[in-house]
Amino acid sequence: MTDRRRYTRIQRALLQWYAANARDLPWRRTRDPYAIWLSEIMLQQTRVPTAIPYYERFLKRFSTAAHLARARLDTILKLWEGLGYYSRARNLHQAAKEIVSRCHGRLPQTKDELLTLPGIGRYTAGAIASIAFGERTPLVDGNVERVLCRVFRIHGNPKNAAIKERLWKLAEDLLPEHEVGHFNQSLMELGSEICTPRNPRCDECPLANLCEANHHNEQDILPTRTAKKPLPSHVVVVGVIYRAGRILIDKRKPKGLLGGLWEFPGGKVQPGESLESALHREIREELDIEIEVGSEIAVVDHTYTHFHVEIHAFECKHLKGEPRPLACAALKWVRPSDLPRHAFPAANKKIIEILRVRRRH
Ligand code: SF4
């Protein structure tokens, strides 16, 4: 069979299957480019069931790019709280401002223009351009990568630059003349629902007869996996510092991990340091104040993409000095009941929940 014929058969099989089996997802019920953009940003690194309530809340609160551009970053981060990868929210806000200032509030319609906005890379630009505007442009995400590696029996690490380019070229060659948005979504849907990382359901797959991995029984070894390095682990200590019934919180600097979120002050414990002395040191270095360290109120484990943390939280009393934001963007004394009004990272939220339960008892 020629490549062209095979590609045509793949297109037909996938489009037919997608027409009958596509999940009914909220962002598939709209052609609004803004809503599709929002969904694509939320779906980066996040599973569909987790993203749906965030998408619905976000769209209800900010129905256009202009609304989003006018919002305060704090408000956006609070709505994003729990979804993780907060640089997505910051980029979304920045991109909304650029859409208003450069594009009269309308999302750019081509992949190349979309790529000029913050937070929009090759995949996201391809997804928005093809799904919202019908541009004949490909996309490759983790699901598509897996499907293509199996259907075309591509061995080798798909993160390798040459293989990556081969996959993008294949995704482009496979595009049909029409229904490009549906076709791109069908590839992703197949990877998500049928051609799953483990135990793909080849018996139910529309590409079973066209898939080389299936013919050679290589579904389990494709795509080629690389051994993951163990994540580094850090011990962190934080203070829940009280003064006159209020708690001191600090806002992280806008850039970098968890940028713009609020947290309890503290930092990494150095080798050979006790938790208490590390906390005294961190609070002096970051805030220039003295505290009395009381009892330990929580130990929280949390895993980020590149490392793992074990956070020890201590109840502390402010002794002297007016806190200064030496290593953060802002500081605030808040009533314990006001903590939930601020956007905190997941690990800090666990501490807040423990504080809430303690207050009730
Ligand atoms: S036949 Fe199996 S391995 Fe091939 S694309 Fe379908 S589910 Fe994936």
Image (cartoon, helix red, strand yellow):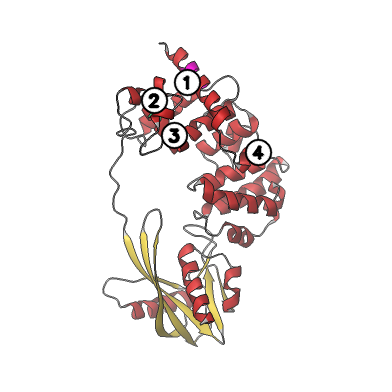
Quarter of the picture containing the N terminus is top left
Whole-percent x, y for residue 283 in the image: 44, 77
**Label 1 with label 2: CB-CB less than 8 Å:** yes
Residue 151 marker = 2
Q: Amino acid at mark 3?
A: Ile
From mark 4 to mark 3, how far is it between C-alphas? 22 Å
Whole-percent x, y for residue 57 in the image: 64, 54
**Rendering quadrant holding ligand 1:** top left
Q: Is residue 235 left or right of residue 120?
A: left
**Residue hosting label 1:** 10
From mark 1 to mark 3, how far is it between C-alphas? 15 Å
State the residue in front, 258 or 300. 300
**Label 4 with label 3: CB-CB less than 8 Å:** no
Residue 9 counted in the magenta span: yes
When the figure is inspected, residue 342 is found, relative to residue 317, above or below; the finding is above
Magenta-drawn segment: 7-11
**Residue hosting label 4:** 29
- Residue depth check, mark 4 versus mark 3: number of the one nearer the observer: 3
